[in-house]
Amino acid sequence: MDSIRKIINLCLLTLAFTAPLCAAPIPGGEETFLNEGLSLGGETPLDKDSPLNNELYDDDSFFDDDSFFFEAPTLVFQVPSFETRYFDEVFPNLSRSQKRFVMSTGLRFAFEKNESPTLVPNPSSGVNLLSRIMSKKPSHIIEALVVVPYNKRELDMLDIYNALGRIKNIQDHTIVIRDKEYKLFTDTTRLESAKVRKPIPDPPISNTLPYSETMYLRFVDHSMGDFYLRGDITVSLYGITYSLTNFRDVSYSIFRIMKAEKFIAIIYLEPVKEGILIYSMSGLYIPNFVSNRINLTASMNYRITILIDWITEGLRKVEEEENPNLHFYQMRTE
């Protein structure tokens, strides 16, 4: 008798915790975020034409009593919150003098494929650019690190995303060499796609932040000519990673000096307590007969400097153009 009673109780518990066969729509169409940020705008209606659901619409179905229908409570999955990190949590092993440079002019170092980087993030920080750089088997690598202090307000990842969107402004930046000013990029623009290389304007300021995005760009370099790049943006828990890779060969006159996919620049940006952390690593492979004829390290460093200056200026502009409505943003899933 006790065994029968236990079985009955178990059946009742199972019915109590089993989802209803048909529930009313979630009121207000609230969005639920699951796993990788997948957005679900309420429940999916059942398909009457599906053979798997025919029994639910059978007039002779046993489950046709109104008592089986009720309004289900809204199910909410909360995105985990996190604290903004201090710079030392990401780069704990820098000397005091190195930190001073990071907070002002920034640090830059060069090394080759058989050497080790100087700027090493905390292994538990989740920041690792070196492995992606080395997958390209580069002959030369440049690393850079700077923190842009907050000015009028603390910036967030949406601010960073909007600063990275102003591709056209890169061409306005110059480099000073031996007291003389040079313009390295004579034109920088977005392209419609990798195949349709038609210039398109930069998009307006956004109030939504994508999980990922790919764009195609053309930089007209004063020494290398047209430089076609694929830009990939990815958003992680603490920051944004912006990767630039050449999707076409790079030629000088009639000579090819770099194959496609042989250049990569990765820029990681994170809002820390002290400001916006900008950590960059760039690598490329150029044959010896070319690299022996130019100062490759200096050439790469000049262009990385321009990119960092462009990002810094973009962050300052975003500060000046603050719109409170932009900071109630959602993540885009498309």
Image: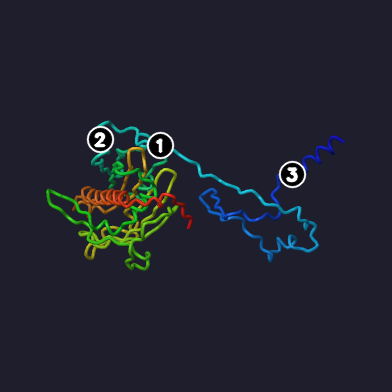
The image quadrant where one finds the N terminus is: top right
Residue underneath mark 2: 100
Nearest the viewer among 323 and 315 is 323
Q: Secondary structure at mark 1?
A: helix
Measured as percent of width and height from the top left, residue 222 is found at: 20, 59
Q: Quadrant of residue 261?
A: bottom left
Q: Quadrant of residue 226?
A: bottom left
Judge the density around disc 2: few (<14), some (14-19), many (≥20) Cα neighbours within 10 Å: some
Residue 145 in view (yes/no): no
Q: Quadrant of residue 213?
A: bottom left
- Which amino acid does the dot numbered 1 rest on? Pro
Can you say whether 78 is above or below 1 in the image? below
Nearest the viewer among 220 and 42 is 42
Query: How far apart, in angstroms, are the residues tagged by discs 2 and 1?
Result: 23 Å
Measured as percent of width and height from the top left, residue 334 is found at: 48, 58
Q: Give the farthest residue toward the left.
A: 179
- Which amino acid does the dot numbered 3 rest on? Thr
Give the residue at x 62% y 58%. Answer: 44
How many numbered markers are drawn? 3
Residue underneath mark 3: 14
Measured as percent of width and height from the top left, residue 129 is found at: 37, 45
Can you say whether 20 is above or below 82 in the image? below
Can you say whether 218 is above or below 279 in the image? below
Whether label 2 touches label 3, CB < 8 Å: no
Query: How far apart, in angstroms, are the residues tagged by discs 3 and 1?
Result: 46 Å
- Depth check, mark 3 against mark 1: the one in front is 3
Disc nearer the start of the sequence (3/1): 3
Residue 123, which numbered label?
Answer: 1
Q: Secondary structure at mark 2?
A: helix
